[in-house]
Amino acid sequence: CDFLGNGCYAEQLEKIYPSVRPAGMQNLITEKNRIRAMIVDCEKKGNDLRWHERGDFYKNGSELDIEYVDNILWACRSILAEGGKLPKMWAYTHIYDPKLSRILGKYITMYASVHNHDDVKRAKAAGFELFAWCDSDKRIAPKRPRGNKNGVADKWRSDLPKLVVLGDDRYITCPEIRRGRGVVTCTKSKNSVNCQLCVQGLANVLFPSH
């Protein structure tokens, strides 16, 4: 991936926990019937579906994987054609392509992952309307501390802004990062508030370096 080495949180997890990447590769589903079965299962269980907890719609790390995207489209359309329902789904992508924003975006809440104003401009030109600003340059906040000795992580969270204005757009700081996973999570959890900000595409989101 072209974005490795820029503070990617998934890459950091793979360094800390070596078993994470093999598990992710084992869970990778690209065949259209398996994609369809996964979506149906999510809806049946009442779960929301995030595409690519790590990774993107890339082929060979640099170009849009058209076949993969078409397989997802086929799965979504075939379910709806038979009178089925789709679960709530969302994704973040560094690929600013109308096929993602305007076509796949009909079925999946699609965020353009951006790092600067030029990225936002290119993403808007490709039809994106939702943006996830990745503060990989640590201009808005320092990187989240590892551990919480002397409450350093708690203080880091409390110092984060709730909302920032970047260029012409407003961004809400990710509530899960700002308040902690024990309080807020993206989707349903027994012991936390169900955020749904990105799942439903309610606003642009800021991801501090974590």
Image (cartoon, rainbow, N blue to C red):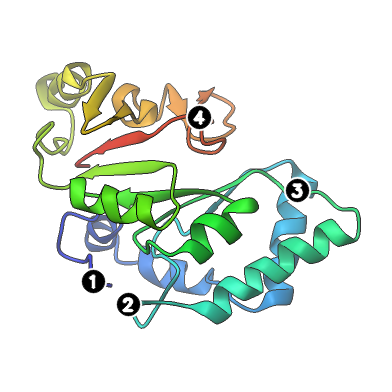
Choose the circle earlier in sequence order: 3 or 1: 1
Choose the circle earlier in sequence order: 2 or 4: 2
**Secondary element at image label 3:** helix
Q: Amino acid at mark 3?
A: Glu
Write down the residue under mark 2: 61
In the rendered structure, the answer to whether residue 64 lies left or right of residue 164 reads right
Choose the circle earlier in sequence order: 4 or 3: 3
Mark 2 and mark 1 residues within 8 Å of each other at the beta carbon: yes
Look at discs 3 and 1 and give the one toward the viewer.
1
Give me the disc on residue 107. none
Write down the residue under mark 3: 43
Look at discs 2 and 3 and give the one toward the viewer.
2
Q: Amino acid at mark 1?
A: Asp
Measuring 77% from the left and 57% from the top, which residue is drawn there? 40
Measuring 43% from the left and 50% from the top, which residue is drawn there? 128
Q: Quadrant of residue 80?
A: bottom right
Write down the residue under mark 4: 202
Q: Quadrant of residue 103?
A: bottom right
Look at discs 1 and 4 and give the one toward the viewer.
4
Look at discs 4 and 3 and give the one toward the viewer.
4
Mark 2 and mark 4 residues within 8 Å of each other at the beta carbon: no
Choose the circle earlier in sequence order: 2 or 1: 1
Image height check: is 62 above or below 143? below
Q: Amino acid at mark 2?
A: Gly
Instruction: List x then y, in percent, for residue 117.
Output: 19, 45
Choose the circle earlier in sequence order: 2 or 3: 3
Write down the residue under mark 1: 2
- Disc 2 to disc 4, C-alpha distance: 29 Å
